[in-house]
Amino acid sequence: MKRTLPRVLNTLFACFLLTAYVGNSQSKTAETSSTLPITSEVKIGKLSNGLTYYIQNNGKPEDKVELRLAIKAGSILETKDQLGLAHFMEHMNFNGTKHFKKNELVDYLQGIGVEFGADLNAYTSFDETVYILPIPSDDPEKLDKGFEILQDWAGNALLTEEDIDDERGVVIEEYRTRLGASTRMQSKYLDKIAYKSRYAERLPIGTLDNLENFKYESIRNFQKDWYRPNLMAVIAVGDLDVETLEQKIKDNFSGLTNPKNEKKREEYYSENHKETLVAIEWDEEATGSQVSIYYKDQGNTKKTKTIKDYRDNMVEGLFDQMINNRLAEFSNKPNPPFIFGFSYKGRIIGNKDAYQSFAQTNETGQLEALKVLLEENERVKRYGFKASELERAKKDYLARLERQFNDKDKRESNRIVNAYVQHFLRENPIPGIEWTFEFAQKQLPSIQLKEVNSLITDFLHDDNRLVILTGPKKDGLKKVTEQEVIDLLNKVESADIEDYEDEAVREELMPVKPKKGSIVQQTTNNEGKLNETKTFVLSNGAKITYKKTDFKNDEILMEAFSYGGTSLYSNEELKETSSANRGVFEAGIDGVDKNEMAKLTSGKIVRVSPFIGGNSEGFRGSASPKDLEMMFQMIHLYFTKLDKDPEAFASYISKQKAFLGNILSNPSISFSIALSEYLNEGNPRYTGFPDEEALDNANYDLAYEKYKERFANAGDFHFYFVGNVDDDKLAEYAETYIASLPSSEEREMYNVFDFRPKTGSHEFNYNKGTEPKSQVRLSFSGETEYNKDEANAMNALGEILSIKLIEKLREEEGGVYGAGARGSINKIPYGSYNFSISFPCGPDNAEKLADASIAELEKIIKEGPTEADLDKVKKAMLLSRKEDLQQNRFWLSQIKNADYNKSDLDSILNFEENINAITTQNVQDVAKKYLTDGYVKAILMPEK
């Protein structure tokens, strides 16, 4: 007999449950509606003039502060006479201010080791302008100068008529660099992205007519109206106490004033449209075919203010990951509909968000790619995602946050500062990684599949929808029509679409471990020194060298090499496999293909990529410490069980054809390839650009056999690991997965061939393109015996000449936006030197600027560089090295290359001494020795 509670008790129990539920529900509502916290790591303040500031003490890297000046003023605020002047104003802040006359600012910063472009920079967008300045914090005078520079940027540009006119040419050259197929096509559809919006008429670069002809008062008015403290923030993150930084901000910015009768900082929006808009553009110089679908939100961008908002963002993030996992599977099919495809919810332009789907495909595959994107969205709408997909997405989401959390005390200042910039500009949340990770741990289990699945209903709608197709225009290629697009949109909505099948994969990559080998020798190298490493010699002859660091808590990097590479292929073998070698790696390992591997590694941070280069073969990879064993397993299987998968190879060839099919339409790329062919005339081993015929003839069978040959002998490999390494685990995994690999006593070396590229005096002229754009490349090369001191001097020569080229070609001539020189002396595969000068410019100036470049070089050859210029380069090198020494990537490269180049790792210890030992005479000597026997002069000109 069934027992029941008396009716009164039932009623009381029900009331209790209801009360508990309501109380709990109210508690959850109060919690989720709470305002998001702001990380306690940052101090946020506001001066009486309205200027906001953000300050955080962060000791990585040492003795450096990252400064930013963010202004809520960009091209959207320009009047019609000011088109392009928000960006022009950015330029003028480097060309004459209260405390630094024209060119003095860059000269000063270079003098303390801050490089123009690499360190010192700025950008202008529709809605903001941001200035970027890293400055040493261990020198009070330099720190004061840094804040003085920021103060000048905030409103002390002189804007003299002479300085403005001098800069017109530079900005016009920057405008010129952006000309091309993408810009031409964008100009025809931007008004559909920014529908009936001011954004469509305010591209930050402006118009050529206005850049050439604007009146001086127009830019002065822009500065007066919008460069004001109540639209500004100063952000300072770095190795200095908060109190000192705060006082610097107050001292330098409290005196700024806002204009009387200031203009209102308007917000601008895009209008909605009921119909589906379609833009189909093509261009003779387009290099690829793209498909884009935008489902624009009805309202404006929603700011993330509350805990509920943040949780909603997490749900959207999980949705994005799952839809993109599905799209990635398509790109690995034998005849993929696209090279890659992805979807996400995010900002489209200004204050408008959209659910967006993109794909890059081949020139005839736009409709098919569009169909797949639409069908995948429709599939989710009808059937939703699977529970297994959601669990994998949660694992990946949490793994990424866990890595950030584990390294929370190891973050570099330049990786922190932008979050505060975006908080000021867009009110992006800054709760901090500790809160974020803890919140995700608590909330991810509560996110239900139905929550994620329900998003697609809001994402997809027939109104406010935009489809954009762009691609190459060429004879014989039929342009897609707007009606075809509309018909496809309608067809997919009623199409017969099956549910997604989530195929299960095995739980472990290597359920059965190989028979262990052993470590036969252990040595400590450079014990007690900065460059200390440890080396294992394994029973099969393989070597493992590692360096344990504390730069990152959750990072281990790996490289490995064995000499040989394709240099050991015959000429015929090389030609047959050159377009196939990379395709070999598209197959899986031990029956686990790329799609299955993505599932198997969900929640893990691990990557291994084999390679076959010209002179060596090997691996590159990375892993979190907890996933290090899987990295070793992947290495083992790439040696022993790389699958042979003709379908995966066919997918690779298909994607290569789609990607490379029209790439020669780009004048710059076409010029580079043609120049390479010219320099390699007569080289029997030059394989050239992989055109469609070469891809069709790629010999997969031979490439696979050569791969097995190159990776048959693990005893000829040397492995390198740098990061948060556990000695015992590394030893265990080395014995289990590396020492167990097949090997032999054979030790190989790469072949060196007789052919050498052109040297001496040659001219190469190439005509391609319709825009008034040119490129100049001047190159010196030849054979020499490697010398470390000469290599250092040659490198310094390139940096010095880069400074002189900017001074001459940009600042004096106004003929280029950027220019540079680079010099090196190499040991492998044979002793050689290379020196090059390159820059884009207008066709009318190409010859003149090429001559001016050589004239600057000849000054150094004749007179040597100045001590001041050499000192700038030395300081930049030493500052850069100081930061490099705290990077795992740097140490991995140095340790591996010391063996690869058969050089001395002690050069790391002697770096400062070696750089300081470089003299102006050393630089002049290498210039005389290597750069006086002629050069290859190559110029790209537009078609006549």
Image (cartoon, helix red, strand yellow):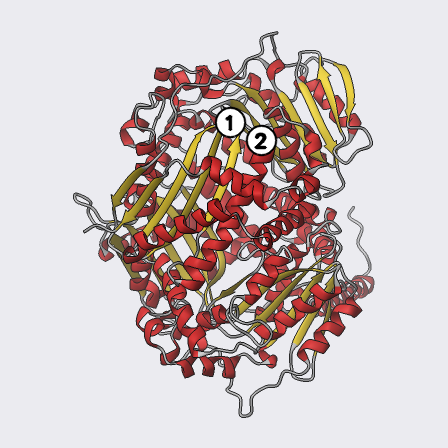
Residue type beneath disc 1: Phe
Q: Residue at position x 62%, y 23% from top?
A: 902
Q: Is 702 on the left-hand or right-hand side of 323?
A: left
| The quadrant where residue 487 appears | bottom left
N-terminal-most mark, 2 or 1: 1
Of 567 and 904, which appears nearest the observer? 904
In the image, residue 106 sits, relative to residue 740, either above or below, namely below
Give the camera-side residue of 817 and 346.
817
Image coordinates for residue 844, horizontal then vertical, percent: 27, 57
* Label 1, residues with CA under 10 Å away: few <14, some 14-19, many ≥20: some
Q: Which residue is mark 2?
A: 620
Disc 2 on helix, strand or loop? strand
Residue at image position (57%, 78%) is 156
Residue 161 visible (yes or no): yes
Checking the image for residue 748, the label placed there is none
Judge the density around disc 2: few (<14), some (14-19), many (≥20) Cα neighbours within 10 Å: some
Which residue type carries mark 2? Arg
Q: Are marks 2 and 1 in contact (CB under 8 Å)?
A: yes
Residue pushed farthest top?
745
Question: Which residue occupies the foreground of this view, 356 or 915?
Answer: 915
Disc 2/disc 1 C-alpha distance (Å): 8 Å
Picture coordinates of residue 176, whole percent (x, y): 34, 60
- Pick whichever, 731 or 768, lies toward us: 768
Element on which disc 1 rests: strand
Q: Position of residue 539 (x, y in %)?
A: 71, 11
- Image label count: 2
Most extreme residue toward the left is 476
Image quadrant of residue 733?
Answer: top right
For disc 1, the marked residue is 611
Question: Does the rendering let one see residue 499?
Answer: no
**Residue 822 point in image, percent of width and height:** 48, 43
